[in-house]
Image (cartoon, rainbow, N blue to C red):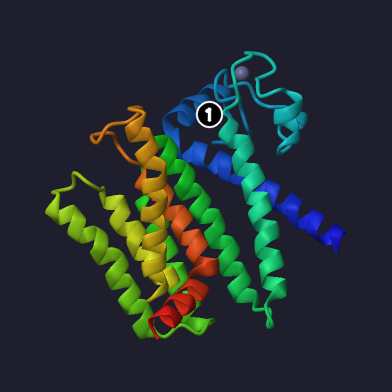
Amino acid sequence: MFFWYSLIFIAGLTLGSYLNSWMWRVHEPARLATRSVAGGNRLGSRSVCIHCNRALAWYENIPLCSFLVLRGKCRTCRKPIPADYFLVELVTALLFVGITYYHLSLSVFSPWHFFRDVFFAALLIVVFIYDLKYYIILPGLVLAGAVVAFIINIRYLTFSIQHLAIGLAIGGGFFLLQYVVSKGRWIGKGDIYLGVMMGALLGWPVIVVALFLSYVLGALVSVPLLVSKKKNLNSEVPFGTFLAVGTLAAMFWGEPIVRWYSGLLK
Ligand SMILES: [Zn+2]
């Protein structure tokens, strides 16, 4: 068993490493274009140092290990490699292992359910980091995610169309309302699209759990920053980052929380 989990861990590291380079390539298309002209390279065919653009050797490109061996610095320009590269690889690998363990402990193993959870864990890692670093929720990414979630949930899992429709209405409507009321000052359009994806992925009533968890987490993180005056009420908030965590938690603990809560009301 240890052997198989090691393989899963390595697969997670590889995926995390890919997510890192994907995010970088999406965010820096202009730099890539000049480089590919200058070097005659196919666009983004090799990984480079983000500071000096030097193409990396194979031993500088191994997830986790290279960062540790190089002590977080580029070998030639000595500038720091951002720590989030390391963390994305580690967290992706750990989530991969955790999700596999979770699915193997279910009474019935459903390949589609497993695939869905791995796919959306990866997607939510991107939403988490991208909003945290750049304050952007990529609309194409989350809307494509909404379509994938909807199809898998309806076609291969036991969601009813009503539950998903209510989930979509709550997820999208909740943020659309805030967007309209505040004329786009509180939240961005990206939050609306992410809300739609959350609805399609989680359905009613788990969407409410995800929103609740996200807001609690947002408050837990924001209040100390406000009190210590590191941020003020006008600071931009990467709310997609909190929503990504709330959504991921609700994917696995949403239904038990709903059952527990409805038990309290009886
Ligand atoms: Zn460098």
Which secondary structure lies at badge 1?
Answer: helix
Quarter of the image containing the C terminus?
bottom left
Residue ID at (34%, 73%): 167
Name the quadrant containing residue 50. top right
User: Ligand 1: which quarter?
Assistant: top right
Residue 60 appears in the picture as rendered: no
Q: Where is residue 123? Give x, y as percent.
A: 51, 55
Residue ID at (53%, 81%): 157
Circle 1 is placed at which residue position?
A: 36
Count of numbered marks: 1
Residue ID at (69%, 82%): 107
Quarter of the image containing the N terminus?
bottom right
Q: Is residue 163 left or right of residue 40?
A: left
Q: Where is residue 226? Give x, y as percent.
A: 32, 34
Q: Is residue 246 left or right of residue 215?
A: right
Q: Nearer the viewer, residue 152 or 125?
A: 125
221 in relation to 260, above or below? above
Q: Where is residue 72? Give x, y as percent.
A: 66, 24
Name the quadrant containing residue 199. bottom left
Q: Where is residue 94? Give x, y as percent.
A: 67, 52
Q: Nearer the viewer, residue 181 or 222?
A: 222
